[in-house]
Image (cartoon, helix red, strand yellow):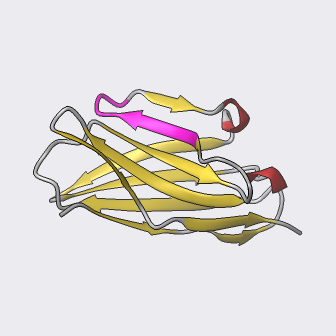
Amino acid sequence: QVQLMESGGGLVQPGGSVRLSCAASGSIFPINAMGWYRQAPGKQRDLVAQITRRGSTNYADSVKGRFTISRDNAKNTVYLNLQMNSLKPEDTAVYYCNVDYRPYDARDYWGQGTQVTVSS
Protein backbone atom coordinates (compact mmCIF):
# COMPACT_ATOMS: atom_id res chain seq x y z
CA GLN A 1 0.00 0.00 0.00
CA VAL A 2 1.36 3.38 -1.03
CA GLN A 3 2.10 5.74 1.82
CA LEU A 4 2.97 9.43 1.54
CA MET A 5 4.22 11.18 4.65
CA GLU A 6 4.69 14.93 4.49
CA SER A 7 6.70 17.12 6.81
CA GLY A 8 7.67 20.76 7.04
CA GLY A 9 5.51 23.82 6.68
CA GLY A 10 4.28 26.17 9.35
CA LEU A 11 4.25 29.92 9.87
CA VAL A 12 6.94 31.96 8.14
CA GLN A 13 7.45 35.68 7.61
CA PRO A 14 7.37 37.23 4.14
CA GLY A 15 10.74 36.84 2.50
CA GLY A 16 11.51 33.78 4.57
CA SER A 17 12.14 30.18 3.61
CA VAL A 18 10.68 26.79 4.39
CA ARG A 19 11.37 23.26 3.20
CA LEU A 20 8.73 20.62 2.62
CA SER A 21 9.46 16.92 2.38
CA CYS A 22 7.38 13.94 1.35
CA ALA A 23 8.37 10.31 1.84
CA ALA A 24 6.79 7.90 -0.65
CA SER A 25 6.90 4.18 0.06
CA GLY A 26 4.97 0.96 -0.42
CA SER A 27 4.59 0.63 -4.19
CA ILE A 28 6.12 -2.14 -6.20
CA PHE A 29 6.02 0.02 -9.32
CA PRO A 30 8.52 2.68 -10.39
CA ILE A 31 7.49 6.28 -9.88
CA ASN A 32 6.51 8.13 -13.05
CA ALA A 33 6.33 11.63 -11.63
CA MET A 34 6.11 13.41 -8.30
CA GLY A 35 4.85 16.87 -7.58
CA TRP A 36 3.70 19.46 -5.09
CA TYR A 37 0.29 21.07 -5.37
CA ARG A 38 -1.30 23.75 -3.25
CA GLN A 39 -4.78 24.83 -2.40
CA ALA A 40 -5.70 28.15 -0.84
CA PRO A 41 -9.11 28.67 0.83
CA GLY A 42 -11.86 28.93 -1.77
CA LYS A 43 -9.55 28.08 -4.63
CA GLN A 44 -8.78 25.00 -6.68
CA ARG A 45 -5.76 22.80 -6.15
CA ASP A 46 -2.99 23.87 -8.50
CA LEU A 47 0.35 22.43 -9.51
CA VAL A 48 3.33 24.16 -7.89
CA ALA A 49 6.21 22.02 -9.13
CA GLN A 50 6.75 18.60 -10.63
CA ILE A 51 9.70 16.32 -11.27
CA THR A 52 9.59 13.39 -13.65
CA ARG A 53 11.25 10.00 -13.54
CA ARG A 54 14.01 11.34 -15.73
CA GLY A 55 14.58 14.37 -13.53
CA SER A 56 12.86 16.98 -15.68
CA THR A 57 11.24 19.74 -13.65
CA ASN A 58 8.26 21.97 -14.23
CA TYR A 59 7.22 25.00 -12.13
CA ALA A 60 4.21 27.25 -11.93
CA ASP A 61 5.09 30.70 -13.24
CA SER A 62 4.34 32.24 -9.86
CA VAL A 63 7.10 30.25 -8.12
CA LYS A 64 9.82 30.12 -10.76
CA GLY A 65 13.13 31.32 -9.39
CA ARG A 66 11.93 31.01 -5.78
CA PHE A 67 11.04 27.33 -5.33
CA THR A 68 13.18 24.29 -6.08
CA ILE A 69 11.90 20.73 -6.31
CA SER A 70 14.18 17.74 -5.84
CA ARG A 71 14.03 14.04 -5.10
CA ASP A 72 16.27 11.65 -3.21
CA ASN A 73 16.18 7.88 -3.48
CA ALA A 74 16.70 5.68 -0.46
CA LYS A 75 16.08 2.01 0.08
CA ASN A 76 12.33 1.42 -0.47
CA THR A 77 11.53 5.12 -0.04
CA VAL A 78 11.67 8.12 -2.35
CA TYR A 79 11.84 11.59 -0.84
CA LEU A 80 10.36 14.58 -2.59
CA ASN A 81 11.54 17.98 -1.39
CA LEU A 82 10.39 21.50 -2.04
CA GLN A 83 12.68 24.35 -1.01
CA MET A 84 10.63 27.51 -0.84
CA ASN A 85 12.50 30.83 -0.70
CA SER A 86 11.44 34.48 -0.84
CA LEU A 87 8.00 33.52 0.36
CA LYS A 88 5.06 35.83 -0.22
CA PRO A 89 1.69 36.04 1.52
CA GLU A 90 0.08 34.68 -1.64
CA ASP A 91 2.04 31.45 -1.16
CA THR A 92 -0.16 30.71 1.84
CA ALA A 93 -1.97 27.43 1.21
CA VAL A 94 -2.17 23.78 2.09
CA TYR A 95 0.56 21.98 0.17
CA TYR A 96 -0.01 18.42 -1.04
CA CYS A 97 2.46 15.84 -2.25
CA ASN A 98 1.39 13.84 -5.31
CA VAL A 99 2.86 10.68 -6.80
CA ASP A 100 1.84 8.70 -9.85
CA TYR A 101 2.96 5.32 -11.07
CA ARG A 102 1.56 5.40 -14.59
CA PRO A 103 1.25 3.35 -16.73
CA TYR A 104 1.30 0.58 -14.11
CA ASP A 105 -1.20 2.22 -11.74
CA ALA A 106 -3.78 4.73 -12.99
CA ARG A 107 -4.47 6.25 -9.58
CA ASP A 108 -3.08 9.48 -8.18
CA TYR A 109 -1.75 9.29 -4.66
CA TRP A 110 -1.90 12.27 -2.33
CA GLY A 111 -0.35 13.19 0.97
CA GLN A 112 -2.43 14.50 3.84
CA GLY A 113 -1.38 18.09 3.18
CA THR A 114 0.72 20.52 5.18
CA GLN A 115 -0.14 24.13 5.93
CA VAL A 116 2.21 26.92 4.92
CA THR A 117 1.25 30.36 6.19
CA VAL A 118 3.23 33.41 5.12
CA SER A 119 2.44 36.32 7.39
CA SER A 120 4.15 38.96 9.48
In the image shown, does 40 or 13 lie closer to the viewer? Answer: 40
Viewer-proximal residue among 18 and 42: 42
Q: Nearer the viewer, residue 88 or 93?
A: 93
Residue furthest to the right in view is: 120
Residue that appears at 63% across and 33% down: 60
Based on the displayed image, in which of its 4 quarters is residue 78 positioned? bottom left
Q: Where's residue 89, x and y in %?
A: 83, 56
Relative to 93, does residue 63 appear above or below in the rendering? above
* Residue pictured at 19% horizontal, 32% vertical: 103
Q: Is residue 49 magenta?
A: yes
Magenta span: 47-55
Give x and y (percent) for residue 67.
62, 43
- Which residue is painted at 17% across and 61% down in the image? 26
Look at the magenta stretch and give its main secondary structure: strand
In this image, 88 relative to 71: left or right? Answer: right
Q: Is residue 16 above or below residue 31?
A: below
